[in-house]
């Protein structure tokens, strides 16, 4: 406390100011009124300018070790929660793309049949070679689709048309057999009966997980695999060729 005149002044802040090229020691009372106490000698250069400046030290804003550990812990928890969801969303998008592509092909096949009254034909001309693994190319040439069938799972994918004349309920239902039928309702019997042609999507070298996810969307788990790597029921069937890990997936689209 400093008494000036008869009024006591309680110093709240002090600092070194420069004014008119001279360095002054200044203090502030409670009302923030500056009081010049004395001039100071200083070896450091004195800045020049018309205004009073103050050399002040700001508070230290650096994080403590505990604060840094807390921030890193929060980031780790968020990453553990979000990263699996991100990969799950990416995988779901791949599977949904296959489902939508199959629906697009099926719609195009129905338009093709309505226009030409035949499944196994190209612009109304009967196909001479069956099975034909380029039927999506036929639909593309007819202007019924914008691009050939391309699945985001597996390595190779295409649309096949094949003859099913003479199929009966006792026809083999085995995705490992190219001439296999389809057990669409899960009763163990072939349901492609009394038809002439069948349209199916083929996807080669599909992982077990992708095949199961695709089946769960199109058929549901109740028509899923009973043996690991093999599914004989529903619209989605698959098998492991020669015991290899990648699967060959067959997807029933339509028959007539």
Image (tube, rainbow, N blue to C red):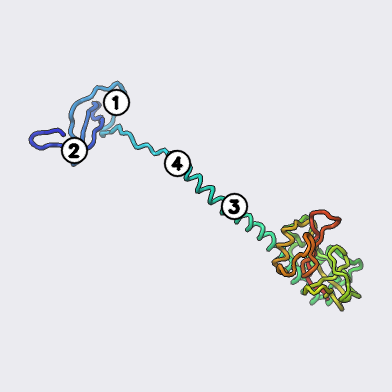
Q: Position of residue 126 (x, y in %)?
A: 89, 71
Q: Nearer the viewer, mark 4 or mark 1?
A: 4
Q: Nearer the viewer, residue 8 or 40?
A: 8
Q: Mark 3, mark 1: which one is toward the viewer? A: 3
Crowding around mark 4 (Cα neighbors within 10 Å: few <14, some 14 to 19, many 20+) is few
Q: Residues within 10 Å of mark 1 (few under 14, many from 20)?
A: some
**Image quarter of residue 104:** bottom right
* Mark 3 vs 4, N-terminal side: 4
Total numbered badges shown on the rendered structure: 4
> Mark 3 or 1 closer to N-term?
1
Q: Measure how far apart labels 3 and 1 are at the Cα level.
A: 57 Å
Q: Which residue in the rendered view is the most extreme toward the front?
A: 227
Query: Is tag 3's residue or tag 2's residue first in the polypeptide sequence?
Result: 2
Instruction: Sort mark 2 into few (<14), some (14-19) or many (20+) by Cα contacts within 10 Å.
Output: some
The earlier-in-sequence mark between 4 and 1 is 1
Under circle 2, the secondary element is loop
Residue that carries the numbered disc 2 in the rendered image: 29
State the separation of the CA atoms marked 2 and 1: 25 Å
Q: Which residue carries the number 4 mark?
A: 66
* 20 left or right of 225 in image: left
Residue that badge 1 annotates: 46
| C-alpha span from label 3 to label 2 | 57 Å
Give the spatial CA distance, label 4 vs label 2. Answer: 38 Å
What residue did someone put label 3 on?
A: 83
Circles 3 and 1, Cβ within 8 Å, touching? The answer is no
* 3 and 4 marks in contact (CB < 8 Å): no
Image quadrant where one finds the N terminus: top left
């Amino acid at each position: 406390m400093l008494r000036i005149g008869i009024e006591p002044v309680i110093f709240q802040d002090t600092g070194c100011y420069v004014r008119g090229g001279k360095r002054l020691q200044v203090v502030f009372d409670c009302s923030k009124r500056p009081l010049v106490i004395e001039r100071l000698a200083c070896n450091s250069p004195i800045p020049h300018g018309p205004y009073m400046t103050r050399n002040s030290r700001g508070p230290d804003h650096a994080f403590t070790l505990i604060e840094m550990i807390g921030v890193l812990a929060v980031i780790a928890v968020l990453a553990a929660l979000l990263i699996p969801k991100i990969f799950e969303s990416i995988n779901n998008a791949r599977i949904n793309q296959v489902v939508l592509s199959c629906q697009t092909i099926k719609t195009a096949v129905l338009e093709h049949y309505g226009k030409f009254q035949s499944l196994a034909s190209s612009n109304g001309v009967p196909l001479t070679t069956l099975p034909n693994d380029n039927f999506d190319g036929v639909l593309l040439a007819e202007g019924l689709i914008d691009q050939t069938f391309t699945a985001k799972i597996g390595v190779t994918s295409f649309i096949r048309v094949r003859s099913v004349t003479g199929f009966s309920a006792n026809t083999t239902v085995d995705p490992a057999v190219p001439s296999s039928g389809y057990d669409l309702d899960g009763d163990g019997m072939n349901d492609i009966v009394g038809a002439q042609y069948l349209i199916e999507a083929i996807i080669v070298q599909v992982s077990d997980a992708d095949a199961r996810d695709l089946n769960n969307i199109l058929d549901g788990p109740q028509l899923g695999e009973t043996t690991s790597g093999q599914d004989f029921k529903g619209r989605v069937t698959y098998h492991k060729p020669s015991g290899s890990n990648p699967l060959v997936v067959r997807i029933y689209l339509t028959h007539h």
